[in-house]
Amino acid sequence: MIEIESIEKVYTVGAVTTRVLKGISFQVKEGEYIAIMGASGTGKSTLMNILGCLDKPTAGHYRLDGVDMVNLKDDALSQLRNRKIGFVFQQFHLLDRATAHQNVALPLIYAEHYPADAEDRATGLLAAVGLSDHISHRPNQLSGGQQQRVAIARALVTDPAMVLADEPTGNLDSKSGAEVMAIFQRLNAEGRTVVLVTHDRAIAEHAKRIIVLRDGAVAEDMPVAQPRDAAKEAEELPEKETNR
């Protein structure tokens, strides 16, 4: 599904040139669940932006389902992004004045054709992430964990082939984080490709494969023999009064 071949990314500011990604190559098969791990400054967020077609590499090739993203114009990239990729970020990026239902349905407004089942699709996805009783709630009426679940439902509303998650538990307490990771594991079990970016080894170990970046290059690429069970972890952690 994903082919990354000799990807480089160089930023130049004035006389200063910084080489962030240094010839990265790897592949991701359809239905895989991988974690891209590394400390701050290793290039993982830059790589995530390239995978999400939010940025282009300075050199190399990125093929998604056999199509080289490097050669596509901005309009084509935007359409492909909306159709094939769902994004989940550390910051939830929900519209403050919109309800959970409206936030989830929002990407469909930008789709090539607004689907007739848009309302039902948003309602069903909120139910799938356990928020049937919070459809009319606005973000300030939801806990942090609930807001992230809304963000996950929004990422899925266009039925993307791949979900990209950038530090999705970074603003959550342990129990909410485990519940969110359990959703990603369930999505992957249903056949969805999931790519997670994190600095946290414990979070990465919920995936089935870990790619470790160091100094802008792939330092390790290894399978996870026994991924951590996020649903079990969530059950064992105590409830908190608030996740905000």
Image (spheres, grey):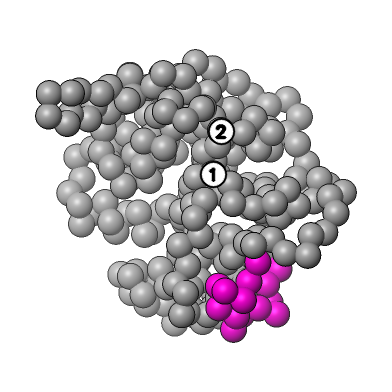
User: Magenta residues, as a range?
Assistant: 130-143
Is residue 137 on the magenta stretch? yes
Q: Is residue 86 visible?
A: yes
Question: Distance between the Cα atoms at labels 2 and 1?
Answer: 8 Å
Position of 118 compared to 24: left or right? right
Point out residue 122 in the picture as x, y percentages from the top left corner.
54, 75
> Are the residues at dot 2 and dot 1 in contact (C-beta closer than 8 Å)?
yes
Is residue 139 on the magenta stretch? yes
Q: Is residue 24 above or below residue 97?
A: above
Residue at image location 45% in from the left, 62% down from the top: 93
Question: Where, by quadrant of the figure, is residue 50 drawn?
Answer: top left
The front one of 189 and 199 is 199
Residue at image location 27% in from the left, 28% down from the top: 9
Q: Is residue 189 visible?
A: no
Query: Looking at the figure, which quarter contains the N terminus?
Result: top left
Question: Where, by quadrant of the figure, is residue 167 drawn?
Answer: top right
Assign a secondary structure to mark 2. loop
Please, what is the three-letter code of the amino acid marked with disc 2? His
Residue that numbered label 2 is attached to: 199
Point out residue 189 in the picture as x, y percentages from the top left corner.
68, 47
For marks 2 and 1, the one nearer the N-term is 1
Residue that numbered label 1 is attached to: 167
Assign a secondary structure to mark 1. loop
